[in-house]
Each structure stands twice: as structure tokens, then as C-alpha cells.
Image (cartoon, rainbow, N blue to C red):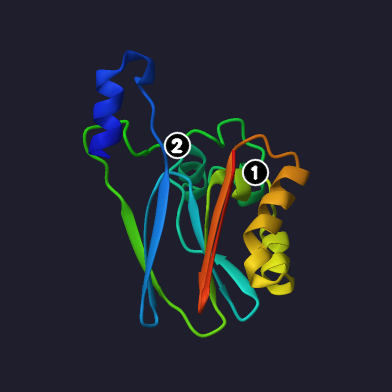
Amino acid sequence: NALVYRAAMETPVLMGMGTTVVLCEIVGSIANISYVGDSRAYHYHNGVLTQITKDHSIVQQLIDSGTITEEQAKFHPQRNLITRAVGTERYVLADSVSTDVEKGDYILMCSDGLSSYVDEKVISDILANTKTSDVVSKLIEEANDCGGKDNVTGVVMGENVRSIGDYA
């Protein structure tokens, strides 16, 4: 955060820039996840995909308050406005969560370029039916096929799996 913030302060054209982050460390059978912004982590366990992070966004605040539903959030005009980002303030607070992982589970970390364009059911189907080394490229392809206009980044972690992909 300090490096991004300093770069923005020292270079006028970069003023206001920021980014999101989600990271995971798996220790034994525990996945420890920290995040800022609307990049997400999902846990795929026994065929069920569960979002384990919570977006730092205006729309998430509206969902939490009961003002809008999850379905309405998908089309809300402010769905891309985040309330927390790396580099926009001198200090940033990352949220953290931990979850138990078992053999056969996956942790998917992705940018909103994936989660905004690909339905969770489709993500789950791809995780279930795609060779593990091809999962991220298939997810990126799906996001682009669904009209993705944003950069798409994904990382899948699991037992003996480290699949990384990025499309800008």
C-alpha cells in the first residue's frame, strides 16, 4: 500500500490510482485469506462454490442494509464503485477470513473482471469439469465470451494445483 500510495503522490498523472488485492496462504488444512476491494476468494468444496470474501463496495453496503438484493446488485449502476483500495489512502485496512480446506477443495481468487461477468454456477461447473491445469484459462475465456470489458485475473489453489492466469 505504501509503495502505491507514494507513487501516486509523487506522480501527478497517477493521483487517485489504486488497486484491489486478494491473497491466500494455505497452512495445513486452513486457508487464510486477506483482501481489499472487490477482488474475491471462493471456496469450492464437495461441488459447492461459496464466496468467502465480502466486497468493499457501495453495492455490498446496500445488500448488507437490505436496500437491494444480490440479483439487483448484478445490474446496479454503482456496482463498480469500491469503498476500499490499495494505494488510495496512506493506510488501508485489509479484512481477513480463514476456512478449512480438504483434499479435493479449491480456493479461487479472482478480479472483478471474472466475478462480474461469469455466474457462480458457471464457475462451479468449470471447476468441476475442467482439467485443473486449464481451469483459469477456461474461466478467463468464459468471462471474455460473456462480454467482459475489464481485465480478468484468476488464481486457483488446491492440493498440488497452482493455476494462474491473467488477461488484460
Horizontal side of 67 relative to 119 (left or right) equals left
Residue at 65% in and 43% down = 74
**Residue 52's spot in the image, x, y percent?**
47, 63
In front: 156, or 160? 160
Residue 35 placement (x, y as % from top left): 38, 52
Q: Identify the residue shown where x is 72% and y is 50%.
A: 141
The amino acid on which the numbered mark 1 sits, given as a three-letter code, is Lys
Q: Are there few (<14), some (14-19), or many (20+) residues within 10 Å of tag 1?
A: some
Q: Which residue of the protein is positioned furthest toward the top in this rendering?
A: 12
Relative placement, left or right, of 157 versus 2 is right
Q: Residue furthest right?
A: 145
Left or right: 107 in relation to 3: right
Pointer 1: what residue?
74
To which quarter of the image does residue 131 belong?
Answer: bottom right
Q: Amino acid at mark 2?
A: Ile
Q: Position of residue 47 (x, y in %)?
A: 65, 77
- The picture places residue 154, in percent across and down from the top left corner, at 55, 54
- Location of the C terminus (image quadrant): top right
Q: Secondary structure at mark 1?
A: loop
Residue at image location 56% in from the left, 67% down from the top = 50
Image height check: is 49 above or below 40? below
Mark 2 burial class by Cα count in 10 Å: few <14, some 14-19, many 20+: some
User: Does residue 116 sit above or below 52 in this rendering?
Assistant: above
Q: Is residue 129 left or right of residue 64?
A: right
Residue highlighted by disc 2: 82
Mark number for residue 26?
A: none
Quadrant for the N terminus in the image? top left
| Dot 1 or dot 2, earlier in sequence | 1
State if disc 2 and disc 1 touch (CB < 8 Å): no
